[in-house]
Image (cartoon, helix red, strand yellow):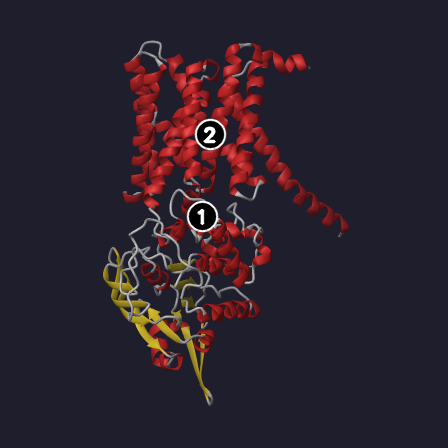
Amino acid sequence: MLNWLILPWHYAFMARALIGAILVGTLCAVVGTYVVLRGMAFFGDALAHAILPGVAIGYLVGGGARQPLFWWAMLAAIISALGIGAIGKTVKLREDTAIGIIFAGMFALGIALISTVENYTIDLSHFLFGDVLGISASDLVRIALFGGLIILLVIIFYKEFLVISFDPILATTLRMPVKGLDYLLMVLIAMTIVVSLQTVGIALMVAMLITPAATAYLLTRRLPIMMITASVIASVSGVIGLYLSYYINIASGAAIVLSATMIFLIVFIWKNLPKTLKKQSVSTVE
Amino acid sequence: MNIFKSSNNYLVHRFPQHEEDTPTLRVSNLGFQIGNIVALEGITFDVVASERMAVVGPNGAGKSTLFKIIAGVLKPTRGLVQIYGHEPKGHICIAYVPQRNQVDWSFPVNVSDVVMMGRVGKMGPFRWPSHKDWEIVHHALDLVEMKDYARRQINELSGGQQQRIFIAQSLAQEAELIMMDEPLTGLDLNTQQDIFRILDMLQEKKVTVMIAMHDLKLASERFNRVLLLNKHLIGVGLPQEVFVPENLSVAYGNHLRMITTKDGVLVFEDTCCEEGDHIHA
């Protein structure tokens, strides 16, 4: 049994994947707490898709090297975050319609750009679904650096983000720079997505942002505890996902997301079960 | 007035001094328009320090909009709002207490977290709550008789308790003008009396309070002055001067039934109060 548990981590690539999954899980969970509380799941999903043109340009320019890919994706993410943020406030259309049009268009542009390269499908699928088993040591350093920076900013602006999320009118009467803080939070979400791209990919990114945080939301009653719980759930999902990936040979990004979804379902059912049972016992008494 | 000594502000140098000899609030020829829809027009009145004023009018009269303009959350399209001689922008002494149904009560914060949010303006960026901030929060909770509930999650509170923690938040903010949006709606009589006891305490502390409400009887019994609003200002002054049949029928139109009896006029209002007249910033 012990051997069974330890075996996967003898491989360096699995060990790196483990560290990567835990780092990214923690980062996404902390930032995702605000995504869940502010109802920004669609924004997060749109943002993840909208950065594909950036990834594509980085891919074409750098010939597959990681560094240019990262920086181009970062540039695209920040521009998209600010752009989507501005659309919601100015365009006459409903916000979700406007965001939907832009993100699908950007996503298509990204696919079109990548498809100019011969045999592009493998690389495209890495962008879409992640490649956690391909994480290198330098990738890990970059994830740790940027992840650390993002979490540091979340801590520094903790009380500001709390107030603008709970009561934006209060934030205004306290004369806080609400718009600036809104944009800062959106940029942090965008950076989180780029840092996490390699682990789960564009298509499943929103799950990393919202599933562990939503699970923690069901279990906790204070924001810091919710963040810590979400991080633990995300890390556990990463570990379970990698085991699944190793032993039953399924795509690692999907395995991580499925693990997180399973944990959510278990918690959700467990949270709702007592009520149902109570109802039943009441009806049998009657 | 300050019940608490003031400290440095969120961003220093942004906050106008309060001028002596000016009313707490002066509203001059205020108008607010969204597209072609007029929400408020030609509103002019003053409120003096420690006054308690009821703002009464049917749904859609613009009560919430008026409050949000005074709080500096919405910009008026015409006219001027002055708090102690300066525009609201910059003041952190104005508190707006939202309607209870506008608050996300399942947000993962407890009572003291919500009250501490009122301190954020005074704390400023890059600072965590100090011992003094916590003292102020606990004192504010004590004043609204909610000290034992400091660690409760906010969705475990009753309607009256929810209202009181927002008053505590305004106290922690060191607000000198508090505007409450229908705080009494949906509360039973005893709970309303609890709130009035706390409002009396605020008045002793020279805090000016404006309350949007529907209950004409409460407005005329428990307030210094009343303001009758329906997009236009219909009347402002003592309740018996403002709540006269002519004014009320202008404000409410068909939604008001007036029955003349030998003791005076009985008034029934049949507008409902659950839907607020909200315009979001």
In the picture, the disc for residue A166 is 1
Residue B144 drawn at (x, y percent): 53, 63
Please say if A132 is above or below B279: above
- Specify which label sits upstream in the sequence, 2 or 1: 2
| Quadrant in the picture for residue A270 | top right
The quarter in which the N terminus of chain B is drawn is bottom left
In the picture, the disc for residue B245 is none
Q: Quick check: A119 left or right of A272?
A: left
Q: Residue furthest left?
A: B78
Please tell me whether mark 1 sits on a helix, a strand or a loop: helix
Q: On what subunit does the disc labeled 1 rest?
A: A
Callout 2 environment at 10 Å: few (<14), some (14 to 19), or many (20+)? many
Q: Residue at x 42, y 43 (%)?
A: A161
Under mark 1, the amino acid is Phe
Residue pointed to by mark 2: A27
Under mark 2, the amino acid is Leu
Residue A104 drawn at (x, y percent): 34, 29
Q: Quick check: A228 left or right of A286?
A: left
